[in-house]
Image: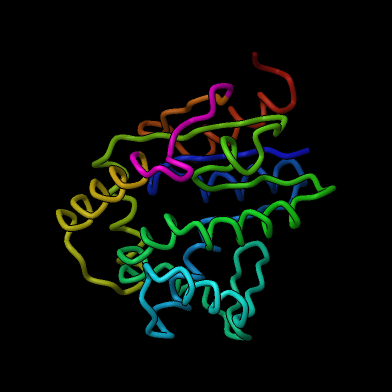
Amino acid sequence: MIITIDGPAGSGKSTVAKAVAEKLGFEYLDTGAMFRAVTLAALRAGIDLHDQQALSDLLARVRMEFSPGQVVLDGEDVSQAIRADNVSKSSSPIAESPVVRQHLAERQRQLAAGRNIVCEGRDQGTVIFPHAEYKFFLVADPMERARRRHRQLSQMGEEISLEEILKTQQERDQRDSQRALAPLKPAPDALVIDTTNLTIDEVVARIVDVVQGRLP
């Protein structure tokens, strides 16, 4: 069984997806981490993030390994490094790259094949797994999302103003929702959940209830 949880940054999808997977005894796939890993690799290689051939060459030579809560790039644990603000700010060209999206889409489908898995990202229910048994799309008030991101970065030791985070978030939301390739939007059959005033446990409980058939 495949469960998809999509939504913009700060909506809580990563935390919720991990918890849902744990509650149901499923595996967990953080697809956003995959794009971030490619972004970090490209930044380190110093290549033009818009150069499709350079990105194709990069993907052919880097080694990326993914497990719940961990991302390994060429043997190095980069689980924290991919969450840095410079990676976030540089991720849009990677997310819009046809070469990267095709490569990672194939990788995601391979990883999910034959498994009970919760897949989290931005286009899991619309593009990658359109026939998933259950689809959810999380949203939240923009300021609340920015506060969550601010707390995350502060815990990582990064000092950045809430105002700057909100501005960057708004720009990314616009790019993600308006891009031609796999735009950020809920699947027609996805259940949309506003997490603004809900705790993580409440969101998780609602999703688990739906999956287990206790709610319509």
Which residue is located at x 50 percent, y 62 percent? Answer: 35
In the rendered view, how is the structure colored?
A: rainbow
Q: Looking at the image, is 75 positioned above or below residue 5?
A: below
Q: Toward which corner of the image does residue 2 lie, by quadrant?
A: top right
Q: Is residue 97 left or right of residue 143?
A: right
Which residue is located at x 67 percent, y 30 percent? Answer: 134
Q: Looking at the image, is 182 positioned above or below residue 30?
A: above
> Please, which residue is most extreme toward the top here?
216
Q: Residue 27's x, y, as percent?
A: 73, 52
Check the picture and name the quadrant holding the N terminus.
top right
Q: Toward which corner of the image does residue 102 lie, by quadrant?
A: bottom right
Query: Which of 5/196 is in front?
Result: 5
Q: Residue 175's x, y, as percent?
A: 31, 47
Q: Is residue 131 magenta?
A: no
> Please, which residue is most extreme toward the front here?
53
Query: Which of 97/70 is in front?
Result: 97
Q: Is residue 44 left or right of residue 85?
A: right
Which residue is located at x 31 percent, y 71 percent? Answer: 86
Query: Which of 41/59 is in front?
Result: 59
Q: Toward which corner of the image does residue 212 lie, by quadrant?
A: top right
Q: Residue 34's x, y, as percent?
A: 55, 63
Number of numbered markers: 0
Check the picture and name the quadrant holding the C terminus.
top right
Secondary structure mostly seen in magenta is: loop
Which residue is located at x 59 percent, y 36 percent? Answer: 125
Q: Which range is magenta?
A: 178-189
Q: Is residue 181 magenta?
A: yes
Q: Is residue 213 left or right of residue 157?
A: right
Q: Residue 104's x, y, as percent?
A: 60, 59
